Image: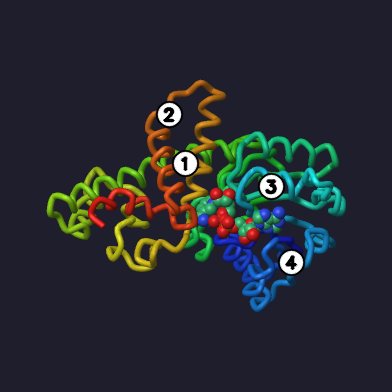
Amino acid sequence: MKIAFIGLGNMGSPMAANLLKAGCEVTVFDIDPTHTKALESQGATAARSLEEAVSGVDTVVTMLPAGQHVRAVYLGDHQGGSGLLKMIAPGTFLIDSSTIDPDSARIVAAEAEKLGFEFVDAPVSGGVAGAQAGTLTFIVGGSDSAFEKARSVLQHMGKNIFHAGKAGDGQMAKICNNLMLGILMSGTCEALSLGIDNGLDPKVLSDIMMQSSGRNWALELYNPCPGIMASVPSSNDYKPGFMTKLMLKDLGLGLEAATRSQSAIPMGMLARNLYAFHNAAGHDQQDFSSLFQFYRKKNQ
Ligand code: NAD
């Protein structure tokens, strides 16, 4: 399998590394060339341009920050830069694993289809640890045949591969998941902080809630209070991980979707506004679990 991997950030780098480990030939490209260095030493070919990256491959995987980056890479930007749909050979299969708005995913899928290419949206859950371990959950939107093709590539990077529905539905399911995650992380920070303020040891409180009805993913695998869990961002100065600005983006995608469907999402909006304050206070590049600091500020 010859794969071009575009976007080698916190998630893309370990995902591309797993494709290399599975024996795929991988060409990598990132607008920040320092991001491709580590992968070159693991056997990837670093391309100097998008065009060079996608030439001669049978599959393209993209892992970019947001919808505008995905549209620019596939369709071209407003300054006249071409998108990869104009660069790839017939039959090239396209997978976007970024978390973006469903409309952008549907627009790219429709443009790809017009030119005879198959495209799936395949956002992921599982974080950097899941990307490193090759245990990500992929949530795919696209036709049945495109889903089967996608599975043969995604199995090298993930464990659970779901077919959410048609183009864009993978993104919609991912947005619902991250709305829940934003709420759960905020609630976990809040409960731990309340316990600390009232004299409890946060490690003991975490152990209690882990075996009680407050148990959730943040508590179980990603405790936001420093020093409780090894190898999570809170115990490493909140180095990401999943940046606050990306969680804010995802909760914003939830708001956009709710506006379209006239749905009430009061909990999601509270979480979004907490993240907006936290982001504006300069924590945008820190891991999203650093929201814990927002609750602790009064004690610092
Ligand atoms: P990141 O910012 O670390 O990485 C994005 C990479 O894309 C950067 O290296 C950037 O230089 C590159 N890039 C931007 N524009 C580009 C372009 N035009 N051409 C080539 N490269 C370009 O972000 P990340 O944490 O890796 O997240 C990527 C996506 O995955 C986001 O949509 C995010 O919401 C989603 N996601 C992240 C996590 C996580 O835990 N970090 C978990 C699940 C989903």
Q: Is residue 48 visible?
A: yes
Which is more N-terminal, label 2 or label 4?
4
- Give the residue type that dot 4 points to: Thr
Name the residue rendered at 78%, 59% in the picture: 50
Residue that carries the numbered disc 4 in the rendered image: 27
Which is more N-terminal, label 3 or label 1?
3
The 10 Å Cα crowd at callout 4, few under 14, some 14 to 19, many 20 or more, is: many
- Give the residue type that dot 2 points to: Ile
Determine whether the residue tagged by mark 3 lies in a helix, strand or loop.
helix
Q: Residue furthest top?
A: 262
**Is the residue at mark 1 in contact range of ligand 1, meaning its CB lies under 8 Å from it?**
no
Disc 2 vs disc 1: which is toward the camera? 2
Q: Are marks 3 and 2 in contact (CB under 8 Å)?
A: no
Determine whether the residue tagged by mark 1 lies in a helix, strand or loop.
helix
Q: Position of residue 196 (x, y in %)?
A: 19, 53
Does residue 70 appear to the left or right of 223 in the view shown? right
Determine whether the residue tagged by mark 4 lies in a helix, strand or loop.
strand
Look at the image and tell me in which quarter the C terminus lies.
Answer: bottom left
Name the residue rendered at 45%, 39% in the picture: 179
Determine whether the residue tagged by mark 2 lies in a helix, strand or loop.
loop
Question: CA–CA distance between discs 3 and 4?
Answer: 18 Å
Residue 177 image label: 1
Question: CA–CA distance between discs 4 and 1?
Answer: 31 Å
Q: Picture quarter containing residue 114? A: top right
Question: CA–CA distance between discs 1 and 3?
Answer: 21 Å
Residue 70 image label: 3
Residue that carries the numbered disc 2 in the rendered image: 265
Q: Position of residue 76 (x, y in %)?
A: 79, 46
- Give the residue type that dot 1 points to: Asn
Q: Position of residue 87 (x, y in %)?
A: 85, 53
Question: CA–CA distance between discs 4 and 2?
Answer: 41 Å
